Image: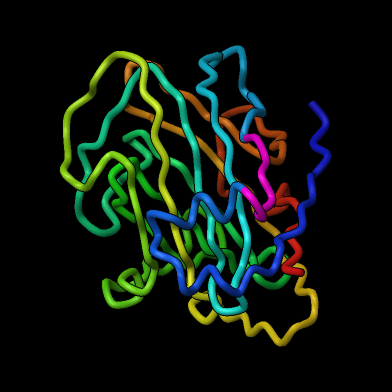
């Protein structure tokens, strides 16, 4: 598969900062940029395809991302900061503010547990501190209590509001071009899967590949 990176524009919606996170989704539905996370780069090994999409916008001070998921298995075992949430029902936003390095990986399970770091690659990175993680506002439709895997038909959403200051970006009213990708995974569920917004051309699942990031422009 040849990887042709995608691109998207992130609309400027200043009123997001005045909204409760529970209601941010409605604003993003109406004014944000909505995209599917539907690329199965490793379809033969991992064919399961939960319906997943995200809506994104920025306020000038924060990037707001809401993820929507419909799936057959739901797991949320991890509940402490920087625990391995990719094992659970998880969505992820990786972003490189300048070029491809360093990049930040924001990974959140369906109860809002956050794992985040500033990285040069998969093996070289610095986890964000508890104080830094606390600046990322979060909302999870499933609540915040952990639970073992459930089987059925589930629809859920999570919102993350990431301060631009946290990733070293200052918005001054002019477009800012960054790079990144959006992911869906659930490594230890009964149906592990690895979906991406922008394609990745590697033999095995590997999200820590900034050379395949798409273009993300703050308008």
Examine the rendered structure and indicate whether residue 152 appears above or below residue 26.
above
Determine whether, in the image, residue 205 is placed left or right of residue 70. right
Quarter occupied by residue 72: top left
Q: Percent position (x, y) of residue 71?
A: 42, 22
Determine whether, in the image, residue 50 is placed left or right of residue 155. right
Q: How many marks?
A: 0
Q: Quadrant of the C terminus?
A: bottom right
Determine whether, in the image, residue 140 is placed left or right of residue 166. left
Q: Name the residue at 57% across, 31% down.
A: 195
Q: Name the residue at 38% across, 40% down.
A: 86
Determine whether, in the image, residue 203 is placed left or right of residue 150. right
Residue 13 in magenta stretch: no
Q: Name the residue at 34% across, 43% down.
A: 109
Extent of the magenta region: 30-36
Examine the rendered structure and indicate whether residue 52 appears above or below residue 211.
above
Quarter occupied by residue 110: top left
Display colour scheme: rainbow
Q: Percent position (x, y) of residue 172?
A: 71, 87
Q: Quadrant of the N terminus?
A: top right
Residue closer to the observer: 79 or 28: 28
Residue closer to the observer: 167 or 31: 31
Q: Percent position (x, y) of residue 135?
A: 36, 74
Residue 34 in magenta stretch: yes
Examine the rendered structure and indicate whether residue 30 appears above or below residue 154.
below
Q: Percent position (x, y) of residue 194?
A: 53, 29
């Amino acid at each position: 598969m040849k990887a042709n990176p995608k691109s998207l524009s992130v609309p400027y919606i200043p009123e997001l900062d005045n909204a409760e996170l529970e209601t941010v989704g409605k604003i993003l539905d109406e004014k944000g940029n909505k995209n599917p996370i539907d690329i199965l780069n490793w379809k033969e090994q991992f064919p399961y395809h939960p319906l997943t999409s995200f809506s994104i916008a920025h306020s000038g001070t924060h990037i707001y991302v809401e993820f929507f998921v419909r799936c057959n298995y739901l797991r949320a075992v991890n509940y402490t900061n920087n625990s391995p949430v990719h094992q659970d029902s998880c969505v992820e936003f990786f972003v490189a503010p300048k070029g491809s390095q360093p990049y930040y990986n924001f990974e959140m399970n369906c109860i809002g547990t956050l794992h985040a770091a500033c990285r040069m690659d998969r093996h070289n990175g610095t986890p964000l501190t508890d104080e830094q993680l606390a600046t990322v506002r979060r909302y999870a439709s499933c609540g915040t209590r952990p639970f073992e895997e459930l089987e059925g038909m589930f629809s859920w959403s999570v919102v993350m509001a990431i301060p631009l200051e946290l990733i070293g970006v200052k918005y001054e009213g002019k477009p800012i071009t960054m790079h990144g990708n959006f992911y869906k995974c659930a490594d230890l569920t009964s149906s592990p899967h690895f979906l991406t917004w922008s394609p990745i051309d590697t033999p095995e699942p590997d999200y820590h590949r900034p050379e395949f990031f798409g273009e993300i422009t703050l308008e």
